Amino acid sequence: MTVLGVFTSLLSPIFLQFAGVKFSDFLPDKLQDEATRYEIYKYQTLLALIASVFCIIPVIFYDLSEKKHAEIIKALYVRAAIQNYHDGELEDKDVLYLKEAVDYYNETSSPIIGKEMETEDAKRTVDEILSKYDEVKASVDAKIRSEAIADFVRDCELAFKRADNLFSTAREKAQKKNMPFDQDGVRRSILSQQRVLAYLYDGDVLLYPDMQSIINDTEKAFDVYESSVMREAEKRFEENVNSEEMKMLKKMASEKSKAERKNKPFSESEFTEKFVKNSKYLKNSEKYKQ
């Protein structure tokens, strides 16, 4: 586009000559004449139109789809891993990205990735790098879990502190008004409203009622928390899937009715396939995966 801008600037004086303005003319004087102003406007507009047409040409031949872009990125993963391996700068992420690219290539035989995979250097090096995969994956997973546990412990600590502050405030209010105060009931109510602690319940029982109990059994507490989070996420996903299904069936019935009124053919399978493809939840549901 910058080249076209320079091209347009260079042609501008020539198009001004078509409008009757010479190189030696003083443009402000020429602009005083209405007929000249019209000609200048006409030819400058024509120049802009020509430049715009040239700008459209690259767009017409632009063929970089989302899939092709993803394959180019994976091909770059392969190239980067091999280069970093030779340079002695191989990182864990290089091994993981290379594994992702190789698995994708084995499934799809992508020619874009194949250009990187089928070089002599790649044939010698890729297997050597991937021999480290299991060790690297275990190390990365352990690091991710460790960071997640640290976040969990910090969140629990903040939740208990917040609960203690709310409990103290509620007790002070009750004392000022000389009202009865159910310490256990109020505390249970406050703790149940803390988001991170809500995942540590077994029925109505908080499995880890204070911070010390979490510190004493951090790994198990985190596993309980993670399992509860996963169950809730799965439940919410299923609810969204069911909601999308209802929308799909309702819309299908409407479209089918319209087609029947107009004596047009209607394919339920084609409609379902198109709807699922554009649905955030249905296309990721096992029920609709093919």
Image (spheres, rainbow, N blue to C red):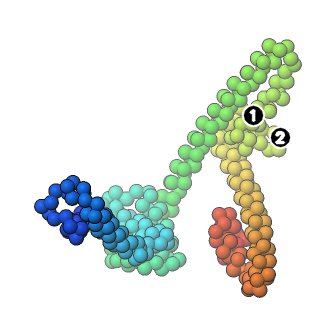
**Any part of residue 117 in sight:** no
Q: CA distance from mark 2 to mark 1?
A: 11 Å
Q: Residues within 10 Å of mark 2 (few under 14, many from 20)?
A: few
Q: Nearer the viewer, residue 275 or 186?
A: 275
Q: Is residue 22 left or right of residue 264?
A: left
Q: Nearer the viewer, residue 56 or 17?
A: 17
Pinpoint residue 255: horizontal percent, then vertical percent: 75, 75
Residue appearing at x 86%, y 17% in the figure: 179
Residue type pointed to by label 2: Asp
Q: What residue is shown with label 2?
A: 204
Quarter of the image holding residue 17?
Answer: bottom left
**Any part of residue 95 in sight:** yes
Q: Is residue 70 left or right of residue 188?
A: left
Q: Which mark is residue 129?
A: none
Q: SS class of the residue under badge 2?
A: loop
Mark with earlier residue (2, 1): 1
Pinpoint residue 206: horizontal percent, then vertical percent: 77, 38
Q: Is residue 255 left or right of residue 36?
A: right
Tell me if residue 27 comes above or below residue 145 in the rendering. below
User: How many marks can you see?
Assistant: 2
Residue type pointed to by label 1: Leu
Pinpoint residue 172: horizontal percent, then vertical percent: 76, 17
Residue appearing at x 80%, y 44% in the figure: 202
Q: Nearer the viewer, residue 248 or 38?
A: 38
Q: Residues within 10 Å of mark 1 (few under 14, many from 20)?
A: many
Q: SS class of the residue under badge 1?
A: helix
Q: What residue is shown with label 1?
A: 191
Quarter of the image holding residue 259?
Answer: bottom right
Q: Quadrant of the N terminus?
A: bottom left
